[in-house]
């Protein structure tokens, strides 16, 4: 288990900045996801740490030691990629043994057999050791790839979208396996994904990237409930956040948010002419009495598992998504009053998209 630290690390390709002044502190033994859309700098970050790339500026530290000058094989790191790249002419057992036969890690037969046994057991590969990759399902192949990376007992484990070639159910199962593995082995794990649900469900902390810049680095709950800007708010969550543009003003120690068709009295959050109110679909619900924050026309009702997801058009014309349990009957074409849960509202500056300081 080792800690990892990026200090103002920048990587450019020609005049394209792939990663901009990254500062990131990863505690030893933790599970951290790098989350962001395609092209946001996630793989660049991982490849810099693995030693496949060198930073243009800044330094990377592993367990307090600078490593930028070290070659990949001196970093005690293992990496698993999206394409598992097993050796097709080798059995599962031979694939697992391969890293131990490589020059720097040569060991005797007995030690290799023991190491294979241990990894095979922890990944449920015991019955597959004599098979060849083409005789395995996608999930089994990916498990072998994980095993091949684990076999040297790396102190840091890097995974670059390792599940994106698998179908949804298998992905959810493998997700659990990876988490389980981390809990047992305890190696510092850095997991790259563009799938927000994967990042939130697996990680101790999530680092959200956009356009080569780290946006927010926090626990999954904080990322979800207190996004630092509208980018994070929208990228995280099943449906992104609902946004309503308006203004905030002070009144009797409280604040009033005003938007077309809506006036919302909330605990004091100062005044600002141009803000965006953000809230998740579980923060709005049908009013039980005549005290509603806004009225909305029901445009669409979707059954999603045990819930209904309802698309509303508020009186001011804003479209909003709301989640109710299936027991609440809302019919398309009807108009209802809705209330917003005060503790679950976020406010952002309209110009910059940054969360208002008083709202955090
Ligand atoms: N070898 C390369 N040459 C030129 N541009 C690159 C190279 N690798 C990555 N990039 C660019 O750097 C940016 C970040 O890429 P990457 O780290 O692979 O993103 P991600 O893994 O988040 O999808 C992208 O704009 C990508 O096009
Ligand atoms: Mg990538």
Image (spheres, rainbow, N blue to C red):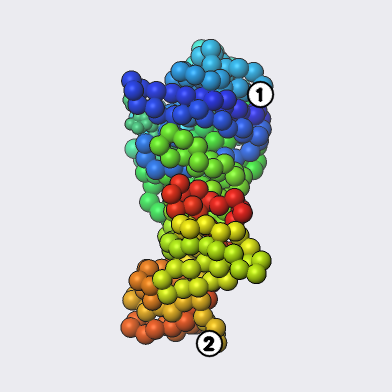
| Tag 2 residue | 290
Front in this rendered view, residue 192 or 220: 220
Q: Is residue 209 above or below residue 23?
A: below
Which type of secondary structure does the marked residue at label 2 adopt? loop
Front in this rendered view, residue 271 or 14: 271
The residue depicted at 37 percent of the width and 79 percent of the height is: 297
Quadrant containing the N terminus is top right
* The furthest residue to the bottom: 289
- Coordinates of residue 32 in the picture (x, y in percent): 57, 40
- Coordinates of residue 95 in the picture (x, y in percent): 45, 28
Per the model, the C-alpha gap separating discs 2 and 1 is 60 Å
Question: Ligand 1 is located in which of the four quadrants?
Answer: top left
- Coordinates of residue 37 in the picture (x, y in percent): 39, 43
- State whether residue 53 appears in this view: yes
Circles 2 and 1: CB atoms closer than 8 Å: no
Which type of secondary structure does the marked residue at label 1 adopt? loop
Q: Is residue 221 above or below residue 68?
A: below
- State whether residue 303 appears in this view: no
Q: Which mark is residue 212?
A: none
Q: Which mark is residue 63?
A: 1
Q: Earlier in the sequence, mark 2 or mark 1?
A: 1
Mark 2 or 1: the one toward you: 2
């Amino acid at each position: 288990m080792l800690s990892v630290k990026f200090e103002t690390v920048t990587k450019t390709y020609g005049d394209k900045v792939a990663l901009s002044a990254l500062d990131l502190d990863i505690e030893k033994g933790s599970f951290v996801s790098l989350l962001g859309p395609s092209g946001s700098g996630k793989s660049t970050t991982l490849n810099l740490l693995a030693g496949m790339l060198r930073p243009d500026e800044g330094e990377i530290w592993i367990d307090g030691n600078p490593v930028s000058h070290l070659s990949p094989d001196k970093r005690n790191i293992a990496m698993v990629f999206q394409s598992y790249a097993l050796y097709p002419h080798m059995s599962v057992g031979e694939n697992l043994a391969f890293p131990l036969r490589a020059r720097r890690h040569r060991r005797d037969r007995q030690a290799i057999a023991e190491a294979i046994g241990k990894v095979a057991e922890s990944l449920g590969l015991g019955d597959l050791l004599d098979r060849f990759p083409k005789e395995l399902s996608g999930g089994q192949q990916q498990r072998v790839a994980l095993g091949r990376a684990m076999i040297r007992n790396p102190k840091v484990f890097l995974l670059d979208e390792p599940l994106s070639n698998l179908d949804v159910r298998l992905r959810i199962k493998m997700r659990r396996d990876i988490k389980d593995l981390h809990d047992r082995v305890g190696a510092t794990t850095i997991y790259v994904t563009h799938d927000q649900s994967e990042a939130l469900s697996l990680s101790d902390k999530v680092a959200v990237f956009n356009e080569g810049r780290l946006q927010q680095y926090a626990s999954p709950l904080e990322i979800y409930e207190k996004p630092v800007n509208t980018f994070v708010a929208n990228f995280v969550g099943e449906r992104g956040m609902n946004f309503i543009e308006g203004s905030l003003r002070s009144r009797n120690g409280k604040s009033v948010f005003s938007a077309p068709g809506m006036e919302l009295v909330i605990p004091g959050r100062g005044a600002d002419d141009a803000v965006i109110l953000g809230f998740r679909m579980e923060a709005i619900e049908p009013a039980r009495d005549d005290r509603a924050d806004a009225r909305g026309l029901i445009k669409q009702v979707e059954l999603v598992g045990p819930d209904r997801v309802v698309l509303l058009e508020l009186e001011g014309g804003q479209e909003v998504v709301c989640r109710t349990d299936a027991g609440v009957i809302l019919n398309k074409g009807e108009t209802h009053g809705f209330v917003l849960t005060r503790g679950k509202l976020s406010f952002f500056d309209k110009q910059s998209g940054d969360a208002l300081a008083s709202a955090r």
